[in-house]
Amino acid sequence: MAYMTSITTIIDWLYNDLHNEKASVEYLKRLKEEGGTVFEDSIKVIYEGFFVFALIWACGGPILDAKVSFSNALKASSTRVKFPEGGQVYDYYFDPFTLDWKLWSEFVQPYDTGYDGLFNNLVVPTAETTRQKFLIKINRVTKKGIMFIGNAGTGKTVILKDYFMEANLDTTVCATLNFNNYTDSKSLQQVIEGNVDKRTGKIFGPPTGKVLIFFMDDLNMPALDKYGTQSPICLIRQIIDYTIVFDRDHLEEKKELHDIMFIACMNPKSGSFNVDLRLTRHFTMIALGVPERDILSTIYEQILSNHLSNWDNSFNGFANRVVGATMDVFNIIAKDPRFMPTAKKFHYQFNLRDFSKIIQNIMCAQPHIFRAQPL
Ligand SMILES: Nc1ncnc2c1ncn2[C@@H]1O[C@H](COP(=O)(O)OP(=O)(O)OP(=O)(O)O)[C@@H](O)[C@H]1O
Ligand SMILES: [Mg+2]
């Protein structure tokens, strides 16, 4: 059922975009004018492309280890809209104008070189951030939740930061719900109610015409109670299912929450290992792995090259060498059993955060203070 709602959400958005966007309406008109069966043939291909694209993310989104097998199986079975040879199905977006697949990497925005001194605010757009932002946009229209699942340092928070930085503040309001082991439904309800205004009578929500997105980082953190449930998770499920919360002082009174949606992140290896399936069925689930070596190099090289752009010429190529060397050390540590977390060395959790810290510290160096020669 969860897969079906995700598929229909994606197809719904693509269908409406095709029939309402000015450029695509004109394109469909042109196809009709060509006469014959051009329009019917093209529309069949477009709808099949949309269906396969929805299938990729609704059913293939939550897969992590078997991504290659899923991709190969889907490539083999989609005959009318054939995928290009290289890459996985996740790398492509179906373009109705050319009736063909286009690489997400073609849609990546250039890196914004402005740096406000806060390293954590730096986001380098990649194919991953671009396609995930697109999926958030689709889910935002129907207010269907989307959940990113991945180990520590797989870029979950970065994707959402990137989305919120570009969100249209005339139509979107964002609020963060922080979860930890002690979060209970009462404190969570207070935070949620603190972010909505009274509209009329029992109806509460963000200012009219806006959608309030609650960003729930580390959703699986709350501890299990003695019944094996997590009360804050149950509260979120109740809000999504019934759009109501009960007034805690007068339980016979209900408050209706309108125009809100939830986006969640969780690391399945920390906190409680599972989140109630009755909540997760409301979300489009996306599993994230550690980005590949060349993507990581691109991210950190862009950040560092930008920092070194006003240094003297002897630093040309320095970013490349530092990132390459850091990557080699990072890969050795990731594979060496001596650096694996054990019961005694549970803090041996090396991930992208540690990579980022090296680059962040190099960025503390300023050209007017630095006197030595580059390596
Ligand atoms: N596209 C990117 N641009 C810039 N930095 C990135 C990008 N992708 C990953 N990073 C870096 O990777 C590190 C980890 O990313 P992030 O904090 O999003 O991980 P996470 O999956 O939310 O981890 P956790 O589960 O621990 O919260 C950050 O330091 C971030 O700077
Ligand atoms: Mg995070």
Image (cartoon, grey):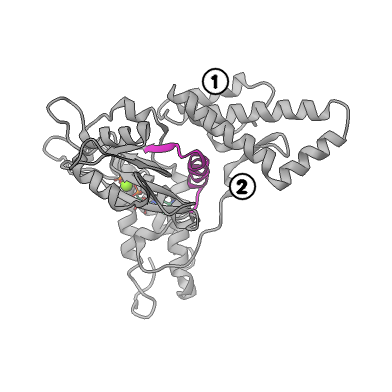
Q: Could you tell whether 275 is left or right of 113 in the image? A: left
Label drawn at residue 147: none
Q: Observer-nearest residue: 22 or 331?
A: 22
Q: Between marks 1 and 2, how big is the CA–CA gap?
A: 25 Å
Q: Is residue 283 visible?
A: yes
Magenta segment's dominant SS is helix
Was residue 145 drawn as part of the magenta stretch in this picture? yes
Task: Specify the amino acid type for callout 1.
Answer: Ala
Mark 1, residue position? 73
In-front residue for pair 27/266:
27
User: At 32% across and 44% down in the image, what residue appears?
Assistant: 216
Q: Amino acid at mark 2?
A: Glu
Return the residue at label 2. Answer: 106
Above-or-below relation of 164 to 251: below
Q: Left of 96 or right of it: where is 217? A: left
Q: Is residue 95 left or right of residue 242?
A: right
Q: Cβ–Cβ below 8 Å for labels 1 and 2?
A: no
Can residue 162 be seen? no
* Callout 1: SS: helix
The picture places residue 199, in percent across and down from the top left corner, at 39, 51
Q: Residue at x 59, y 24 (%)?
A: 75
The residue positioned farthest toward the bottom in the image shown? 368
Q: Quadrant of residue 340?
A: top left
The location of residue 299, given as percent across then percent down, is 45, 53
Q: Which residues are magenta?
A: 125-148
Q: Position of residue 15 (x, y in %)?
A: 63, 34
